[in-house]
Image: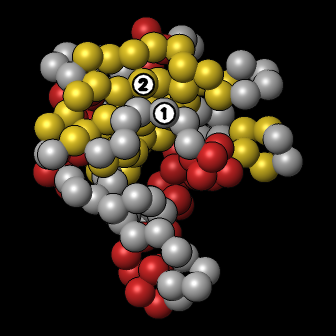
């Protein structure tokens, strides 16, 4: 699949709404092969409150999926409707594939999941656009850019 096949307009609208509602915190979720969207639970604030020395970021600048979301992702990959895209937002800093995004996506230099990553640019509660990153064989590269209004 390519960036043009992974996200349709309806899914993008749902993700944009999620990013705007969740602002100023990061949203996160999945897009399935059938274009269904699952809004994930970002537990970054809970992790930060429990162990701030380990989890230095809050939900304003980081995300971690709840265990139930991670289990759903893993189960989907062997099913008939696998997750194709993991998404999250970057409040007030732009859509780019950060070092932390890369650390979450790779293990020993290889993708953990066979998915693309959508990063949504949201500032002051308004979505400015998004970028889709796909594995090139060596790194995650931007394969498609989306305008603020799909």
Q: Position of residue 22 (x, y in %)?
A: 20, 55
Task: Assess whether mark 1 and mark 2 are in contact (beta carbons under 8 angstroms).
Answer: yes
Between 33 and 111, the one lying in front of the other is: 111
Label 1 crowding class (10 Å Cα cut-off): few <14, some 14-19, many 20+?
some
Q: Quadrant of the C terminus?
A: top left
Q: Which residue is mark 1?
A: 96
Between 75 and 24, the one lying in front of the other is: 24
Q: Residue at x 53, y 14 (%)?
A: 143
Locate residue 29 relative to residue 53 in the image: left or right: left
Label 2 crowding class (10 Å Cα cut-off): few <14, some 14-19, many 20+?
many
Locate residue 39 relative to residue 101 in the image: left or right: left
Report the Cα–Cα distance between label 2 and label 1.
7 Å
Between 75 and 47, the one lying in front of the other is: 47
Which color scheme did the rendering employ for the protein? secondary structure
Q: Which residue is mark 2?
A: 131
Dot 1 falls on a residue whose secondary structure is loop
């Amino acid at each position: 699949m390519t960036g043009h096949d992974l996200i349709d307009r309806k899914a993008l609208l749902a993700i944009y709404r999620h990013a705007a509602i969740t602002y100023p915190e990061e949203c996160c979720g999945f897009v399935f092969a059938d274009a269904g969207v699952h809004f994930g639970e970002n537990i970054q604030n809970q992790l930060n409150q429990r162990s701030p020395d380990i989890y230095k970021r809050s939900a304003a600048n980081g995300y971690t999926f709840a265990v139930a979301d991670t289990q759903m992702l893993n189960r989907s990959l062997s099913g008939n409707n696998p997750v194709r895209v993991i998404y999250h937002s970057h409040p007030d800093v732009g859509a780019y594939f950060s070092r932390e995004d890369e650390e979450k996506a790779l293990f020993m230099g290889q993708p953990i999941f066979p998915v693309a990553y959508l990063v949504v640019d949201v500032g002051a509660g308004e979505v400015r656009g998004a970028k889709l990153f796909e594995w090139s064989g060596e790194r995650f590269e931007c394969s498609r850019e989306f305008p603020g209004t799909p």
